[in-house]
Structures are given as structure tokens and as C-alpha cells.
Image (tube, helix red, strand yellow):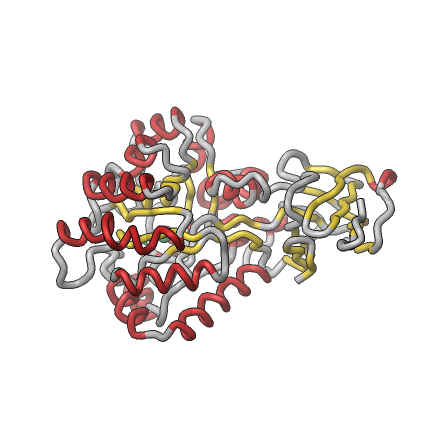
Amino acid sequence: MNPATTRSLAITGIGELFTGDDVLRDAAVVVDGDRIAWVGPTSGTPAADERLDADGAAVLPGFVDSHAHLVFAGDRAAEFDARMAGAPYTGGGIRTTVAATRAASDDELRASAGRLVREALRQGTTTIEIKSGYGLSIADEVRCLRIAGQLTDETTFLGAHVVPTGESADDYVALVSGPMLEAAAPYARWIDVFCDRGAFDADQARAILTAGAKAGLGVRVHANQLVAGPGVRLAVELGAASADHCTHLTGADVDALAGGQTVATLLPGADFGTRSPYPDARRLLDAGVAVALATDCNPGTSYTTSMSFCIALAVREMRMTPAEAVAAATSGGARALRRDDVGRIRPGLRADLMILDAPSYLHLAYRPGVPLVRTVLHNGVPQ
Ligand code: NIG
Ligand code: FE
């Protein structure tokens, strides 16, 4: 268990272990290097080089935030203020952030995205997806993806966020699915399209996503955030890993998700920040749909990196049980990213986990707004 190059660490004194498969009491975890080596009853804990006493606290997998837009400049606090006074969200503010992002230097963008990744990590997020989408030119999309790639392996090309000011939609769709995709693909694992009112329609989204899949990228879709449009069904049709938002769903959308392989990624921070209805998580779960929770961190709709906040909203407003919400924020996010090495505490998986300042995972929803994450291990290293 202890090759010369790595140190092993036994975490004991765990009050409650949420593994993603079970909730165990009187359990211990042994980490070896960057992997989980052993999980079992405290009495059988194998010898390890070091010991960490959880002192009766709950331990759970690191959060997997499968949807975030972290490479941008400026903020849109004034837009939020107007919205809270009754203005609607239309997506038009994306162009404000595009202008600020284009005007920022690489160093400024890297510093601000890095700050958000560290902010998320302190709150328990050990895997995070980062999208482009505030560049909307070949050069700006590529530099945003390069910066994202310095912070995560889960990079997503979102050239099709909106049509930039002054450009024709047809020309822009041709650009995104042609030369921009070609330039961006080496820096991206995924392709995403905002398929919604005021952004891209089903035919435009299908053309872009199909081109992306042909270029070797996995597919994800911003779907059904503003209206019950075609996005969710398109995502299922294309075998997308994830359909994200799902705020407005028809029965046909739920049936499509239940019959397909696409995860429904719910983003309650965006519904909070746009004063929208929350997605009907209960209906999705009862239909057998795989559900993930993510922050959608971005300066327009959801300027939060807190997965705990999303869990609390999902429990209070979306009728998920605390166990369902924590699973959606960990193993659900892993599934939405088609990752089998994160999201659970199981031997062989990455040693990404957190120790709470609380005796149970229930407290994440029960004590909303309280910073309950005491210690985070990322790749086996305490942060
Ligand atoms: O997921 N809706 C599309 N994109 C983002 C918001 C972007 C913005 O308003 O800046 C979202 O909510
Ligand atoms: Fe988003």
C-alpha cells in the first residue's frame, strides 16, 4: 500500500461517511498518494504513515461542479440589481461581459478565473468544468480556453453562447462550426451551445454540436433555461452527456431524458439569480432521470461558486432529499462529465474528499449559508 514515492494517510474518527454508495458510521478511509486505497470499519484500518482525526465529523466526496463559466472580466451587479427590481433576464447581458473580456489581458483573465477556482476549492469543489463563451471571436475563444485548460481538464468550447453584436446569425453559425471550432478543439474536451430563446435555435445548435462531435468533442447543451424549447430533446437526440438548466420542461422532455443517457444538470443558482421558477427535480428523479447539480458560476445569472448553496436550494425549493442533492453534487456531476474516477469515496478513485465542521451531510442543507467545509483533500493533498 505504500510505494516509496507516496505517503499514506488514514482518516479516522469519522462520524459519518457519505461514500456516494452508502452512508457509513464508524468508518475509516485510507488514502495512498493521490488515490483512495481503502474504505472500511475503523477497527480494521490498515497501518498508514500518517493519521488525520476527523473528530466525529462527516466526510464526503469532493464536489464535482460540472457547469461553470469562470473566464470573464467585470461583473454585472447593476444588472442583478435591476432584475431584483423586476427587470427580466434575456441573456442580452452576455454581450456586456464579452466586451469586458475582450478588453482584458490574459493575465487579468487568468488571475480572476484562478481566484474563482480557489474559492470553489475552499468550499469543497475538487473537480470543476470551465466553459469559454465570453470571447466569441476565434482569438478570444482560444485564449479563454487556454486559460481554462491551465485550471482544469474539463474545458468546454461555448463559442455558440450568443451571436456577437453586429454579426449575422448565419455567418456566425458557419464561423463557430468551421474555423472557430477547428482552432478551439485542441483546447477543449466538450462543446456546448446555448439553445434557447434569443440565442440559437434547434437547427443552428444541431449543426454546431454535430460539427463539434465530429471534431472529437463531447456534447453538452444549455437547454430549456428561458422557455420549454427544443434544447433538451436535441441533447438526448445527440447523446449529449448533459442537458443543463432544465428549468422549463414538458412531459415529452422528461420522457426523452428518462429514455436516454443524458444527465439533467440543474442549476438552481441561476434560477435564484434570475428569479425564475426552479426545475422540477422531483418529477425528473421519479421518472428515473439521472440528475446533477452545478453552480453555473458566471457574472450574469449565478455569481456563486458554492455547491452547498445549490444543495440547500435543491432541498428547499426543488424537493430533492438531502441525500439526493449531495449525490447530485458529487457522483451526479461526475456522471455529467462522464468521469468514473471522481465523485465517490471508493478504493481506486481519486482522493478528493472533504471533512465538514458538522456531524452529518444533512447539515449542508440544514445549515444554509454557513461555511461548513473544514478540510479539503484534493488528489490526496490537504488544501
Ligand atoms: O448558463 N444562459 C446562458 N449562459 C449563462 C449566463 C450567461 C450570462 O448571462 O452571462 C447561464 O445562465
Ligand atoms: Fe451556463
Identity of the residue drawn at 46% across and 31% down: 285
- Residue 239 on image: x %, y %: 36, 32
The picture places residue 331, in percent across and down from the top left corner, at: 55, 40
Where the N terminus falls, by quadrant? Answer: top right
Front in this rendered view, residue 240 or 264? 240
How many labels sit on residues?
0
Q: Is residue 257 visible to the viewer in this orientation of the structure?
A: yes
Residue 209 position within the rendered picture, expressed as x and y whole percent measured from the top left: 29, 42
In the rendered view, would you say 330 is above or below 308?
Answer: above
* Depth order, front residue of 22/46: 46
The reply to whether residue 269 is visible in this rendering is no
Residue 102: give x, y in percent of width and height.
29, 70
Q: Quadrant of the C terminus?
A: bottom right
Residue 42 as seen in the image, left or right of residue 92: right
Q: Residue at x 51, y 57 (%)?
A: 306
Compared across the picture, whether 313 is left or right of 141 comes to right
Q: Is residue 351 left or right of residue 106?
A: right
Residue at x 42% of width, y 74% of height: 107
Nearer to me, 323 or 59: 59
In the picture shown, does residue 128 fall above or below 288?
below
Which residue is at 45% across, 45% downward?
317
